[in-house]
Amino acid sequence: MTTRKTPWFIKLAGLLWLLSLALFAPAATAQQPSPPDSPSPFDPRFGIADSFVNIAEANAAGVGWTRVFFRWDVVQPAGDFDWKPTNVPDTFLNAEIAAGRDVVAVLIGTPAWATPGGTSTAVPPMESWGDFVYKIATQYNGRIKHWVIWNQPDITDPNSPSYTWAGSEEDYYRLLKEAYLKIKAVNPEMQVHLAGLTYTWDYNRGNRQYLARLLDIIQADPQAAGDNYYFDAVSYHVYYSPRQVLDVVSDIRNLLNTYGLGHKPVWVNETNAPPSEDYIEPVAAPGPFKITLEEQSAFVIQAFAMGLAGGAERVAFFKMRNERAETPYGLLRSDDSRRPAFTAFQVVTTHFAGTQNATWQQESNIYIVTLDRGGQTTTVLWNMATAPTMFTLNAIAPQALLIDERGNEQLITASGSVYTIALPGAFCSNKSNCFIGGAPRVLVETGSPNQRAPQLPALTLTATPTPSPLPPTDTPTPTPPLPPTLTPTLAPLSPEDEIMAESTPAASPDNQVTSSETAITEAPPAPAAEAPQVIAALPDPGVGDSLSPLDTTGNEPETIALTPVPPVTFSTVMTPRRILWLLVIGLIVFVVAYGVQVVIWYRVRR
């Protein structure tokens, strides 16, 4: 019997096919670079959402962490068997990690095939959801540690542009539990965060907070305590008012403590006061308030200082770059030019870095946040009144560096053991609704805050509180007190400000916390007429849309964060890996086509 030899071109085609399988295995096992060996040059507490859109500017800003969205309906659009690249390419994520930034991923978006209605807001089958979570956590194991499960499920109005979740609190609990167990099965060191919540959605409707309702359900599960109650951290979105950043974080910490969970970190995943005007890039979709570029710049320093003082583990600005068709959130304009707030963010990452403890106090119209940075003290001061004032601060060191929101620095000398600092008045673009203070001043001294001579009793709150945990119960019914500015005294509202509630900023006896730390003495206060009013429970703006700040029902739009896909260029599409893939495919097609032609030619000759 004659054995026919396999033609050489068939062998070559098979060899090339096996080589392609080895080179281009499924994404879950490919491209797993380790984090950089050297420590990150950035403080991980200060972040910007979507910083990957301009990594060079993110490095210049000192961004320590970033947040991206991984959409399930993008990764598995056709079914359980399908697996596409995520909406944020690996090229960008790997560059972020190589720069030393933490990447925090939000998992969201039900695929059309997973539910009868075919909507991304629908409650998915838990088995399919769990499979997706396990696969994507495996794919990014070693690159992404923090996972946020969904976004803003507390928004319940299907007509809101920020509506992302059609399920109940019980449905979200099942979603969270499934994700927690699958992620921890991949790597127990991974951290699972509750979805970013708004606080204002429930507050403005007189509801118990979504977090409280969810914790009731979680603690009713007898297995929850053994699995860390299925979450490692809490995330919130707070906009417009620096004081509200402090109040929301403080109230959430009180709520967690009521449930015996006060040890869990609280993150502010989104904060901003997007401007209503920009002479370089006119605003296409302004928010509900008048905000100048200077006020946004002042907000950045004030909000991050208040976040630290309230005990937030991390704070992130939303977001890196503005898109022309949306509310102007970006530190960068759509052409990548810097807004003034970019420099203010640099002041934060430079002079707030290394903070070990933070306290805050209010003396009349002046806010003071003191940051203990371990051998160095940063003091942040700003004026809530419209009239400028001179303020005296007891000195820790004979000389200090004074920085403004534009990054200008000057060395100043104490006189009589005090510094006299000029604090500009607040812009108050919203008239009496003055929720952003004047341009802040940042004072950096060598030494500890304990070296500052006490003069006045201070209103303080440590950045790392040590609450007395209460034992969890099966059916807790906590009623934590609201922060003072979240209990507004209503006043007649103008039509343009109908969503704004007013309250005075003066500290009441109910909200004072006594402390032995005292730091300041003040110049004569501004006249009473200069004292502005502070907004309570300011709504979050819409995110990722160009709709009016108010919908037809009068409800304020809340945030819905969609990660933009970076612009497609030749360098991002034709990566070396893809070029090699195209060459292999082309060679296989050529060899097979050539072989077919040879076979046909031999048969024709016979």
Image (spheres, rainbow, N blue to C red):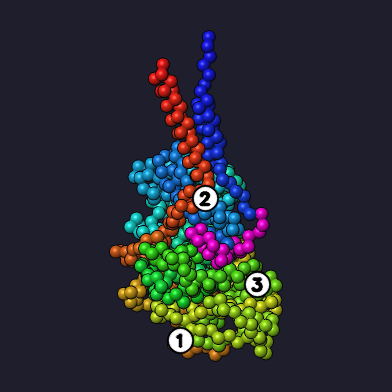
Q: Residue at x 56, y 56 (%)?
A: 96
Q: Is residue 31 above or below residue 446?
A: above
In the rendered structure, does residue 594 fall within the stretch colored magenta? no
| Structural distance between the alpha carbons of marks 2 and 3 | 38 Å
Q: How many marks overall? A: 3
| Structural distance between the alpha carbons of marks 2 and 1 | 53 Å
The magenta span reads 37-62
Of badges 3 and 1, the one in the foreground is 3
Among numbered discs 2 and 3, the one appearing first in the sequence? 2
- In this rendered view, identify the residue nearer to me: 408 or 172: 408
The residue where tag 1 is placed is 530
Q: Residue at x 49, y 40 (%)?
A: 583
Q: Is residue 463 above or below residue 213?
A: below
Circles 2 and 1: CB distance less than 8 Å? no
- In this rendered view, identify the residue nearer to me: 52 or 383: 52
- In this rendered view, identify the residue nearer to me: 146 or 500: 146
Among numbered discs 2 and 1, the one appearing first in the sequence? 2
The image shows residue 129 at horizontal and vertical percentages of: 46, 43
The residue where tag 3 is placed is 372
